[in-house]
Amino acid sequence: MRTKDPKKYEAISNAAITLICEEGLAGTSMSKIAKVAGVSAATIYVYFENKEAMISELYRSSKKEMSEALLQGFKPNGDFETQFRILWNNYFTYALKGTKAFAFLQQFEHSPHLTPECQNHAKEYFTPIFIFFEKAKRDRVIKNVSFELISAFCFFPVIRLVQAHVMGTITLDDQTKETAITMALGTLCPS
């Protein structure tokens, strides 16, 4: 069995994410990844069983990276509004950076490659966030709705705001971000 070189693994992973962002999942072949990574096609199979296994692993590692960014300064047992603002701002900052990993996640999550198994495995990285929202529901600080609804109304709009900001149709200054956070909190909190 060949020894796995961390630099080759990183080169292959970066090449795969770059190509998937540029050409889509269907347009990215193992041979293209190998060429961009500067390795032989056979070398990729030392690190990944097949393309499906590779993109599933890249999804999990990208989700881990994302969770680490979201959890910066976050305290699950802290004041709800303060901690919600930290999460929202961290997500905004992460999305605004426009990393290839974030673009890859957006593409992967809207593809048939996202399996429940892959999704469930990646959820573990966000456990503190789930605990935070479950506690807020139990304490009746927020409405008792699913996390999917919370995400749809509070965090998915961040992606659209960042896209509009990048396109120049909106300027996301502190006042606009504050308005967006207040609107997100308004959807969560009981009337």
Image (cartoon, rainbow, N blue to C red):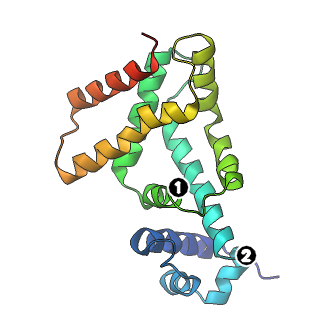
Is residue 5 in sight in this rendering?
Answer: yes
The image shows residue 9 at horizontal and vertical percentages of: 62, 72
* Circle 2 Cα neighbour tier, 10 Å, few/some/many (<14 / 14–19 / ≥20): few
Task: Please name the residue that numbered disc 1 is placed on.
Answer: 109
Q: Which quadrant of the structure image shows residue 129?
A: top right
Residue type at tag 1: Glu
Residue drawn where x is 45% and y is 55% of the image: 102
Find residue 163 and name its label: none
Residue drawn where x is 52% and y is 47% of the image: 66
Question: Is 47 drawn above or below residue 66 in the view shown?
Answer: below
Q: Please state which of residues 129 and 141 is positioned toward the viewer in this rendering.
A: 141
Q: Is residue 158 left or right of residue 13?
A: left
Q: Is residue 49 left or right of residue 143?
A: right
Residue drawn where x is 64% and y is 75% of the image: 51
Q: Quadrant of the N terminus?
A: bottom right
Task: Please name the residue that numbered disc 2 is placed on.
Answer: 49
**Residue pushed farthest right?**
1
Q: Quadrant of the C terminus?
A: top left
Disc 1 element: loop
The CA span between labels 2 and 1 is 21 Å
The image shows residue 29 at horizontal and vertical percentages of: 54, 82
